[in-house]
Amino acid sequence: MASDTITAGETGCFDISRQKWSDEIIEEQELEDTLFCDVVRPDHVLGRTTSEKLGIPKGVPVCVGSSDTSFGIVGAKAISVEDMVIVAGSSAPINTLVSKPLLDSKQRTVTNPFFMEGIWSVEANAMMTGLAFTWGASLLFGKAGKQEYDELQQLGLIAFKKGFSQIVSFPGVGIADSRHGNLRPTSYVIGRTRDLMSGNFDRPAFAASLFESVVFSILGNVELLEQVANIVPNKSLAIGGGETKFALLLDMLATASGRVLTVTNDVDLTSLGAAMVAFTDIKWFGFLARSLFKDAKYATGPSIGKSQGMGLCST
């Protein structure tokens, strides 16, 4: 049994500075030592398969895993201090990399070790961003799939072309606050009575409100991270994950932030990052060598929406 340092950090019983279990916390909470397994760096081969019962040949290296978000950061090619990436999937954790374990005095963000020695990640999470689109599509169309997501985006475009609406939705998104729990206890949709009476409280306006809520919750968390990490706002933002399939979302993020939006080529960031770390573990290449990324090509905003924003990227 073993854990990587990143996942161990999320137990609340791990000293992220010394990167070992905290004897003080374990003793204070009267926890049994037997609950805590060995901790290894997340670039470690635990062993090799010993049988073929799982349909895998004998002798295949078994590497230690890590958290989905941390693998997503690597998959988005963020590997240097002050790199910031939005891993936009079911939720939208935004992480920036720092050279020391920074702690937010107001306890809004989460800090964990990272894959490389001497680097930590600081996270703020906009929470249920992708799930907000799933909820909205299911509510409007009875289910949520590629066709329904496309229709949701088209409805949003209709609303923005029509003009600004006074409908506001808050579908479980917000600014990180780990002290009080990230998950918001309520979600709501509100609008002005005169919009309701005049027919402006419609499906396109509701769809547009979902995109607005996600965009501004993400950008609010970006600003929070810049404040906590005391870094100068970057002129560009990196984003990857399933939500990047929404060209409208990318265009709005670039426009609202006034920054160039760097969109990674792969929506499956976590799987990609896991593979990259595994190949490092088995010495197929040096750890996340920057030369791997020197020829990377990205799509950028704010003109993404005009070109549909999908399938533009390659490495």
Image (cartoon, rainbow, N blue to C red):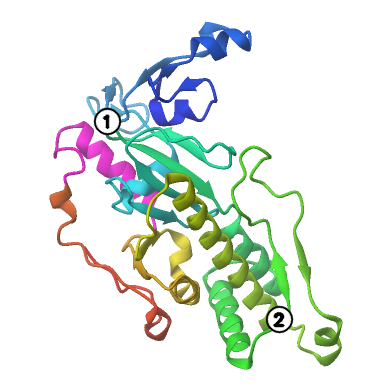
Q: Amino acid at mark 2?
A: Arg
Position of 92 relative to 120 (above/below): below
Left or right: 66 as drawn, with respect to 149: left
* Region in magenta: 267-289
Which numbered dot is residue 117? 1
The residue drawn where x is 35% and y is 35% is 114
Viewer can see residue 89: no
Q: Amino acid at mark 1?
A: Glu
Which numbered dot is residue 191? none
Q: Real-space Cα distance between discs 2 and 1? A: 50 Å
Left or right: 203 as drawn, with respect to 33: right
The residue drawn where x is 57% and y is 66% is 216
Q: Earlier in the sequence, mark 2 or mark 1?
A: 1
Front in this rendered view, residue 277 or 106: 106
Q: Which residue is mark 2?
A: 203
Q: Position of residue 91 (x, y in %)?
A: 55, 53
The residue drawn where x is 26% and y is 44% is 276
| Pair 2/1: label in front | 1
Q: Label 2, secondary structure: give it.
A: helix
In what quadrant of the picture does the C terminus appear?
bottom left
Q: Position of residue 94 (x, y in %)?
A: 46, 51
Quick one: label 2, few (<14), some, or many (20+) residues within 10 Å?
some
Instruction: Please give the count of numbered marks on the rendered protein.
Output: 2
Q: Position of residue 313 (x, y in %)?
A: 28, 69
In what quadrant of the picture does the N terminus appear?
top left
Viewer can see residue 276: yes
Position of 185 relative to 165 (above/below): above
Q: Label 1, secondary structure: give it.
A: loop
Q: Position of residue 30 (x, y in %)?
A: 63, 8
